[in-house]
Image: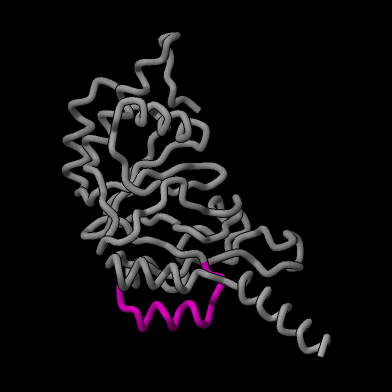
Amino acid sequence: MREILGRRRRLRFRRKRGPVQLEAALTCAAEWQWPVLPGVGLKAAGSRGDRGRGCACPDPECVVPGAHPFDPGIMAATTDGRMVRWWWTNRPTAPIMLATGGRAPCAVSLPAVAGARALSALDRMGMRLGPVVATPTRWSLLVAPYTLEQLGELLFVKDCVPSSLRFHGEGGYLVLPPSETGTGQVRWERTPLPGSAAPWLPDVEAVVDALVEASTSAPDGGSRLAY
């Protein structure tokens, strides 16, 4: 009897610790209508030379290990729950990649330290934010979809934009929680609020305006959003 109970406990523990990417990917695709696809992921633990931290793609010098599409490519991103289920059933630990732009969310990202400062500053300003994705190296603020033309016009009228900002728009991609990449675990710093058809997203103009204001209001005259 003790042996049976022990096996049951171990089974429950394994289930609890098992991959949760499939459930998260289905939520993104089927509930929120965000097009996703599996990322390339990391080499298996024990692979020669990198002890599991290297990218599974053929490029030995990959600068974003695990955190990019490979096969399939970014154009294969879909909201079809059947395709998503097939992908992550066959690759249960694959990172979740969001294809940004079109009808899908876009993002503005900063280095992690600057991102933490920015969120604190925006909270003090009363800025309403949407979901925020955090990795050990960068934080990404999700925003409503925008076109490259809209982004160009927005940046053109700005006297100064922090050089640490990156924009993830049409044709781009972003890794979503609960993925693991070569830089570490991906998590929600600001979790999407439950109970709605899709998470609310602010306009990119409002977020960039707030970030520029936060950047130029440092007491010493420098930038709060510098590296």
Residue 161 position, x and y percent, is 32, 26
Residue 75 position, x and y percent, is 32, 68
The residue sitting at 42% across, 81% down in the picture is 85
Q: Is residue 182 above or below residue 38?
A: above
Q: Left or right: where does residue 74 sit relative to residue 58?
A: left
Q: Which residues are magenta?
A: 79-94
Query: Residue 59 lies in what quarter of the image?
Result: bottom right
Query: Residue 151 lies in what quarter of the image?
Result: top left
Residue 196 position, x and y percent, is 26, 61
The residue sitting at 19% across, 49% down in the picture is 147
Q: Is residue 23 above or below residue 150?
A: below
Chief SS of the magenta region:
helix
The quadrant of the picture occupied by the N terminus is bottom right
Q: Foreground: 139 or 125? A: 125
Q: Is residue 218 above or below residue 167?
A: above
What coloring was used for the rendering? one colour
Residue pushed farthest top?
220
Within the magenta stretch, is there residue 3?
no
Residue 107 position, x and y percent, is 33, 47
Q: Foreground: 82 or 197? A: 197
The residue sitting at 26% across, 51% down in the picture is 200
